[in-house]
Image (cartoon, rainbow, N blue to C red):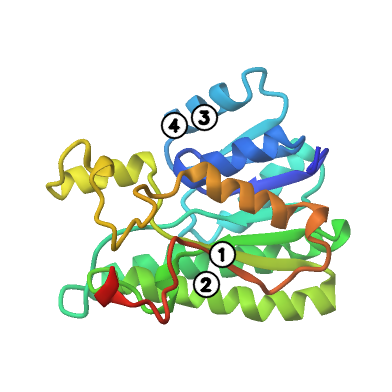
Amino acid sequence: MRLKNKAIIVTGSTTGIGKAIAQYCLNEGARVLIHGLEADLAEQTQKELDPEKTKTAILIQDLAEASAPEKIIQSTLDAFGKIDALVNNAAIVGTGNIHDTDEAKFDRFMSINARAPFFLIKAIIPHLEKTKGNIVNIGSVNAYCGEPELLPYSMAKGALQTLSRNLGDTLHRENGIRVNQINPGWILTENEKQRKQDQGMAEDWPADLPAIFAPSKRIFKADEIASAAVYFLSDEAGPVSGSVLDIEQYPLIGRNLAKC
C-alpha cells in the first residue's frame, strides 16, 4: 500500500474529483478527512467509502471563513494524531466574463479557489514539516488562459498554479515539504454532467462529443485524476516538487485547430 498509515486532508471530497481522491487514498492504506459543505453528502460519502468509520473523519466547513484552516487542522489531528498530506481540491466552478463579473462574484472565485488554499497551506506548514509531508493542489488547464466564459475561475486557477510553482521550491528547500499541482482538463463528474444539462445539453451529451474537445471520443473520469494524485502523495514521487501535471487529451499550446 503506497499511502499506508498516512493521514490526508482532501478538501471538497464529498463529490467528484475530491471523492475519487479520497477513495484512492483509502484504497492505498491512508486515513482521510472528508471535507465539504453539506452534512448529508459527507455522511453519504463516509458510509460509501468507510462503512465502519474507522479510517475517515468528517468536517463541514466553508473555506471562506477565517477559522477554516484552524478547524480543518484540528479536526485532522483529533481524528488521526498527525497530518501527512493536504489535497486542496475544493473549488467554485462557474461562468463569468469581463462584462458580467461583478466584485462579489470575482471575490468569491478568488476566495475559495486561491485565497483558501494559500492560508490553509500557511497554517499547516508546522504539521507537515514534522511528517515531511506534501501538498497537492488541484487546478485546471484553464489556468493558462481560460475559456471566454470562465474568466474569474481561470484567473483564480492561474493564481493557484503560481502558488504551487513558488512553494514547490521554497517549502521544499526550507521545510522539506513537497508541493505539486494537477491541472485536469474536462472531467465527467456528477456535477459537470448536471451542469451541462442545465445549460441545455441533452441528457446523454457525454456520448456525442466533438473531436475538437475529445479526440479519444470521451472525456476524463474522476478516477483518472485520483490515480495521478496518489503518485504525488506517495513516497514514489521522491523529491518531485514544483511540478504541474496537465491531464488533458491535447496540447493547449501549439494545437492545430484547423485540423481538429
Front: mark 4 or 2: 2
Percent position of residue 215, x then y: 36, 57
Q: Which mark is residue 45?
A: 3
- The three-letter code of the residue at mark 2 reads Leu
Q: CA distance from mark 3 to mark 4?
A: 6 Å
215 on left or right of 4: left
Q: State the residue in front, 70 or 200.
A: 200
Q: CA distance from mark 4 to mark 2?
A: 26 Å
Q: Which mark is residue 160?
A: 2
The disc, 4 or 2, on the residue closer to the chain's N-terminal end is: 4
The residue at which mark 1 appears reads as 117
For badge 4, the amino acid type reads Leu
How many angstroms separate mark 2 from mark 1 (CA)?
8 Å
Circles 4 and 1, Cβ within 8 Å, touching? The answer is no
**What secondary structure is found at the residue carrying circle 1?**
helix
C-alpha gap between disc 3 and disc 2:
27 Å
Label ID, residue 41: 4
The disc, 2 or 1, on the residue closer to the chain's N-terminal end is 1
Above or below for 253 versus 88: below
SS at circle 4: helix
Cβ–Cβ under 8 Å for marks 3 and 4:
yes
The amino acid type of the residue labelled 3 equals Thr
Horizontal and vertical percent position of residue 213: 31, 60
